[in-house]
Image (cartoon, helix red, strand yellow):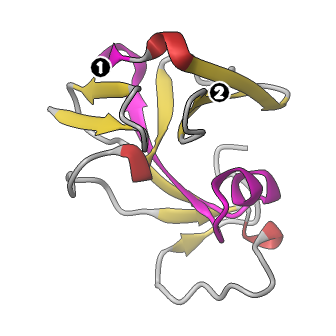
Amino acid sequence: MMHGYCECRRVTFEIDGDIHDYSHCHCSQCRRLHGAAYATFAGVARNQFRYTSGEDVLKSYASSEGHDRKFCGECGSSIMVELVDEPNDYYVSMSTIDGDPPRPDGYHIYVTSKAPWHEITDDLAQYETDPAD
């Protein structure tokens, strides 16, 4: 069982399953919304994710067609991205998950949009867009 929360701890959740996808997104939207060089997401099964508090303070933002981002309405922490094309999964912001849970090998997506001041220095796979496209 994994647990997570936003910065103010109003929104808490648990995941009763494994991380099946682990990606580092370099698109300009993720960079702006996370205030970082990239955003790291843990793909989990929707039916294994459950809010334990704060669902009433969640806000949504449709950052693009088919991408619905959930964040805490109190502190602004990014919680997840829901993708219309992937109705069985959630992509939870790894920064909100407690500890160091097991996860598959990661990869980088939208590297053609990466910040010009950031250098990718690991050996993970890199994709110009999303490998699922």
Residue drawn 35% across the image and 41% down it: 20
Q: Which residue is mark 2?
A: 83
The amino acid type found where label 1 is placed reads Gln
The image shows residue 116 at horizontal and vertical percentages of 81, 84
Residue drawn 53% across the image and 72% down it: 125
Q: Is residue 47 left or right of residue 24?
A: left
Give whichever of discs 1 and 2 has the lower sequence position. 1
The image shows residue 109 at horizontal and vertical percentages of 65, 61
The single residue placed furthest to the left in the displayed view is 1
Q: Is residue 2 left or right of residue 78?
A: left
**Up/down of 7 relative to 99, above or below:** above
Give the structural element (helix, strand or loop) at label 1.
helix
The amino acid type found where label 2 is placed reads Leu
Residue drawn 36% across the image and 34% down it: 9
Q: Which residue is mark 1?
A: 48
Q: Nearer the viewer, residue 50 or 24?
A: 50
Image-quadrant location for residue 32: bottom right
Q: Which residues are magenta?
A: 25-53
**Up/down of 122 relative to 31, above or below:** below
